[in-house]
Amino acid sequence: MIDDAPNDRTLEISQAYAKIHKEIRVISNKTKIGVGNAIKEGIEKAENEVIIITVAGKHADPNDLVKMAEKMNEGYDMVFGDRFSNGLRLPGYQLKKLIANRLCNLAISVLFGIKARDITSGVKAYKAEILKKMEINSKGFEIFVEMPVKAYIMGNKNFAVIELAHKGRDAETSHFNLVNEWPKYLRTVMKCFIYKLKYNRTDSLKASNVKMLSRH
């Protein structure tokens, strides 16, 4: 569990649970605030073969994490959580956020060919080796776009999708500000597209070099 919230009791409560449940490891991340920085800290400190990322809050169901772990045991590179399996409207989910979400997911699907409806979901699982060798630049919520898209570009296309028992987060408690975050998401999508072009070009050059060497 990574705590980077300076104005609540998350650290205190988590440490109390960690004393009871020894499998819980609490990391206080006070120097680099932001969900992206917290996730990068967690990836760096992770020691197991699978990393499951989720956001804290009453809208999330812990049973989803169990389902993700079981799915990863089937040999997938990644597992994506889907909040919209049962329709587009979630209780408490603002219409403007829904529109922005659908547009962003559509753009990702078209530009990168990822056939998933909720690529921007904050609940995902990855093989640890994928994330540990990835250069992650995001500092905020846009990390939920950067990681799955870059992983897919890198050739990790064996993924599964599970339905989330997700409740729309109350606008009063959410730290996600659409006005501030939407431009970051767009920039991240475009940066990933440039990354895709460079990655594909590098792969093509490597393939050409292999053919030239084989001729000799």
Image (cartoon, rainbow, N blue to C red):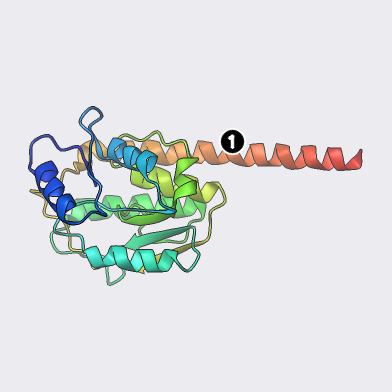
Q: Residue furthest right?
A: 216
Q: Quadrant of the C terminus?
A: top right
For this rendering, which residue is in front, 211 or 42?
42
* Residue behind mark 1: 198
In the rendered image, residue 45, in percent from the top left (x then y), is placed at: 36, 40
Q: Looking at the image, which residue is at 52% across and 61% down? A: 158
Where is residue 188, by image quadrant? top left
Amino acid tagged 1: Lys
Q: Looking at the image, which residue is at 15% across and 38% down? A: 5
Q: For mark 1, does the 10 Å Cα neighbourhood hold few (<14), some (14 to 19), or many (20 or more) residues? A: few
For this rendering, which residue is in front, 17 or 130?
17
Q: Is residue 96 above or below residue 164?
A: above
Q: Looking at the image, which residue is at 23% across and 54% down? A: 22
Can residue 167 be seen by looking at this rendering?
A: yes
Q: Is residue 78 above or below residue 153?
A: below
Q: Is residue 77 left or right of residue 17?
A: right
In the rendered image, residue 129, in percent from the top left (x then y), is placed at: 49, 47
Q: Is residue 24 left or right of residue 119?
A: left
